[in-house]
Amino acid sequence: MNDDSSQLDDEGAIRMAIGDLRLAHQDLDAAIQALEAGPSPDQLRVARLKKRKLNLRDQIARLEDRLTPDIIA
């Protein structure tokens, strides 16, 4: 029983982390769009933000994989 409640706590923490990462991903997307909309966007800064955005997407995918149970076919 204790393992079940611990697992639920871990699942809740993972879901919260996913939510935080998704919010950060959206913020980066908005920042990238704003930079690109400017008169002369700093391409190096845009590239760095895009790299961070991809890193966040990878982190989200890894956490989502932890929530999905392994199914042996």
Image (tube, rainbow, N blue to C red):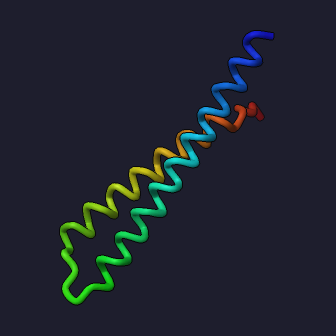
**Residue shown at the point (42%, 71%) measured from the top left:** 30
Quadrant of residue 72 within the rendered picture:
top right
Determine the residue located farthest toward the right in the rendered image: 1
Residue 15 rendering spot, x and y as whole percentages: 63, 40
Quadrant of residue 32 within the rendered picture:
bottom left
**Residue shown at the point (19%, 85%) measured from the top left:** 40
Q: How many marks?
A: 0
Rendered view: 16 above or below 52 = above
Query: In screen coordinates, is 48 left or right of 15?
Result: left
Locate the N terminus by quadrant: top right
Residue 62 rendering spot, x and y as whole percentages: 53, 41
Determine the residue located farthest toward the top in the rendered image: 2
Rendered view: 32 above or below 10 = below
Query: In screen coordinates, is 42 left or right of 53?
Result: left
Locate the C terminus by quadrant: top right
**Residue shown at the point (46%, 58%) measured from the top left:** 25
Residue 28 rendering spot, x and y as whole percentages: 39, 63
Residue 11 rendering spot, x and y as whole percentages: 67, 31
Rendered view: 4 above or below 66 = above
**Residue shown at the point (58%, 48%) measured from the top left:** 19
Query: In screen coordinates, is 50 left or right of 66?
Result: left
